[in-house]
Structures are given as C-alpha cells and as structure tokens.
Image (cartoon, rainbow, N blue to C red):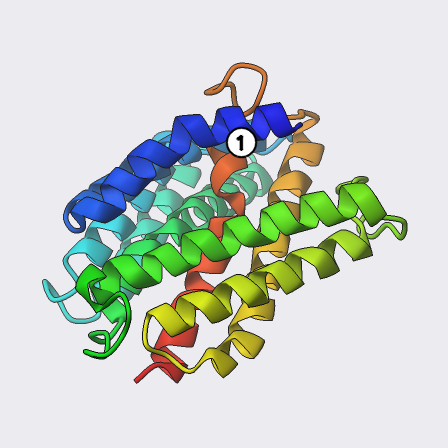
C-alpha cells in the first residue's frame, strides 16, 4: 500500500505543484483536464452500475461549469444559467428513450455525474474567493490563491495519511463496512487530528488565527472522508475496485481526487464565511 501511494504521489505531485506555482490560468486548465478524465470514469462507473447516461453531454456540462468559474465576471448569475441550460439539454436528450422511466433515469444519472465531477471547480473558486494575505503573513510572498489552495491540498493529504497510518496500526472499530470495509473509527480520529495540526500550521503561515483550525480541521477531515466514501459507493455499485487504470495497478483519476471533490467546496465556504 505504501509503495502504491508513493507511485501515485510521484505521478501526480509534480504537475500539481507546477500548476499551483504558475497560478491562473494554469490552475483552471489543470482542473478542466482532470474534470474531463474524471467525468469519463464517473460515466463508466454509472454505466457499469446499470445507469444509462449521456457521457458527451455530461462532460461538456462539467467543462462549462469550469469555464464559468475561470471567468466569473463574464455574466452575472452565469452559474445558475449554465445549470438551467444543462438540465434542459440533458432532459431533451432523455426524451428519445422509449420508456419514460429510462429517460428519467438517464437524465438524473447524467446530471448527477456532471455535477459530481464539476465539484472540483471549487479549487478555482477558492482561488478567486480568498482575500489578499496580510502583509505580516510568513508566506505573504506566495500569494493568497496559491496559499489557500496549498492549504486545501495539504489538509486533505494530512487526513488521508493520518487516517491510513493510525487506522493500520490501531484500527479496531469499523464503520461504513457496507461501503468500505477498511475504514475505522480510530483511523478517522487519527486523520482528523493530523488535519487539525496541519491546518493550524498553515493558517499561521497564511497570517490567520490558528484557532480557526479547530473548525477548519474537522470540516476538511469529514468532507474528505465523505468524498472518499461516496466514490467507494459508486465503485461498489459498479462492482469494480478502481475507478480507472490511469496508473496501472493503482487506479484512476477519480481515485485520486475523490476527497477533494467534497473538501474544496467546504474550504471555499470557510474562506467566504470566516476569513477577512
């Protein structure tokens, strides 16, 4: 398992670091590419689970959401407008199904798949939502966009690593066994503690009160865990171990970003509600 994680990190970390270092528009372009790859995997999983979808329409819908986040001032209310257009187009396509029940299921599954993978767009939204870092912040030179996206990435990784190490060593009490048999209460607790500690350090570096980690850490931990479990539910329904084969023997793109899909909106909400 540790070797697999190292392989995954070697594959994903260098381009991720480069993307964050370059800033916009490279962050949006990177999110768009990952969204396309993840959409292909999600629609494949839904098909394997017995749900017909329109993969092309769903992927275009998800990409449109990314494009809207990359240019938020282009049209006021454009997010809702895109959602309405996507629902209309996918609904119109579903009318071709002979059985209305099949049409409704196809419409619902396609909209779900598109919205699900497009949650990654909150990485872009996070970069746009953050206020400038205080001049006295230790990493003020890094910039608010890079700093907060870095906190999201490192916070999720801290939870994943802490949960794995503590769960492997001390895990006894299982939870959510019907979805993921390996998850333990001890692992979740260990991951949460690790996330709180990492968030405290990063908030200090960003010039924010470290007491915020008492709220942000558990929020990141819970959302990362939920994101992982939801993807596991999809894979269980599809009867597969991995979402794809991008990294031979290790999994696909969705396996690597599942936690971020739920954690990115949560961190964005924290910034909007808490950071000044």
In this orientation, which residue lies closer to the viewer: 70 or 202? 202
Which class describes the residues within 10 Å of circle 1: few (<14), some (14-19), or many (20+)? many
Element on which disc 1 rests? loop
Whether residue 190 sits left or right of residue 103 in the image: it is right
- Residue sitting at 57 percent across and 37 percent down? 102
Q: Position of residue 80 (x, y in %)?
A: 29, 65
- Residue sitting at 49 percent across and 66 percent down? 199
Q: Is residue 12 above or below residue 159?
A: above
Q: Quadrant of the C terminus?
A: bottom left
Is residue 16 visible to us here?
yes
Q: Position of residue 150 (x, y in %)?
A: 36, 55
- Residue sitting at 43 percent across and 75 percent down? 270
Q: Position of residue 83 (x, y in %)?
A: 32, 58
Q: Is residue 249 above or below residue 70?
A: above
Q: Quadrant of residue 15?
A: top left
In this orientation, which residue lies closer to the viewer: 270 or 98? 270
Q: Residue furthest left?
A: 74
- Residue sitting at 27 percent across and 74 percent down? 137
Residue occupied by mark 1: 52
Is residue 252 visible to us here?
no
Whether residue 21 sits left or right of residue 159 in the image: it is left
Q: Quadrant of the N terminus?
A: top right
Q: Quadrant of residue 36?
A: top left
């Amino acid at each position: 398992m540790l070797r697999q994680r190292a392989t995954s990190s070697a594959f994903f970390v260098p381009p991720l670091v480069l993307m964050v270092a370059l800033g916009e528009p490279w962050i949006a372009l990177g999110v768009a590419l990952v969204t396309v790859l993840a959409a292909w995997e999600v629609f494949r999983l839904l098909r394997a689970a017995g749900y017909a979808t329109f993969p092309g329409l769903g992927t275009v819908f998800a990409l449109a959401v990314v494009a809207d986040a990359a240019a938020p001032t282009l049209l006021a209310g454009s997010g809702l407008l895109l959602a309405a257009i996507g629902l209309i187009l996918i609904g119109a396509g579903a009318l071709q199904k002979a059985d209305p029940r099949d049409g409704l299921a196809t419409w619902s599954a396609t909209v779900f798949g598109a919205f699900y993978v497009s949650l990654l767009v909150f990485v872009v939204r996070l970069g746009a939502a953050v206020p400038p870092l205080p001049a006295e912040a230790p990493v003020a030179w890094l910039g608010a966009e890079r700093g907060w996206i870095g906190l999201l990435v490192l916070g999720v990784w801290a939870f994943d690593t802490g949960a794995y190490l503590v769960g492997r060593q001390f895990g006894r009490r299982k939870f959510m066994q019907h979805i993921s048999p390996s998850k333990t209460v001890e692992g979740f607790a260990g991951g949460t503690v690790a996330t709180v500690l990492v968030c405290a350090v990063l908030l200090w570096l960003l010039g924010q009160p470290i007491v915020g980690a008492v709220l942000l850490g558990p929020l990141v931990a819970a959302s990362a865990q939920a994101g992982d479990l939801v993807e596991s539910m999809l894979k269980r329904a599809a009867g597969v171990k991995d979402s794809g084969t991008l990294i031979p023997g290790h999994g696909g793109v969705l396996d690597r970003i599942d936690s971020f899909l739920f954690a990115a909106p949560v961190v964005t909400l924290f910034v909007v509600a808490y950071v000044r």
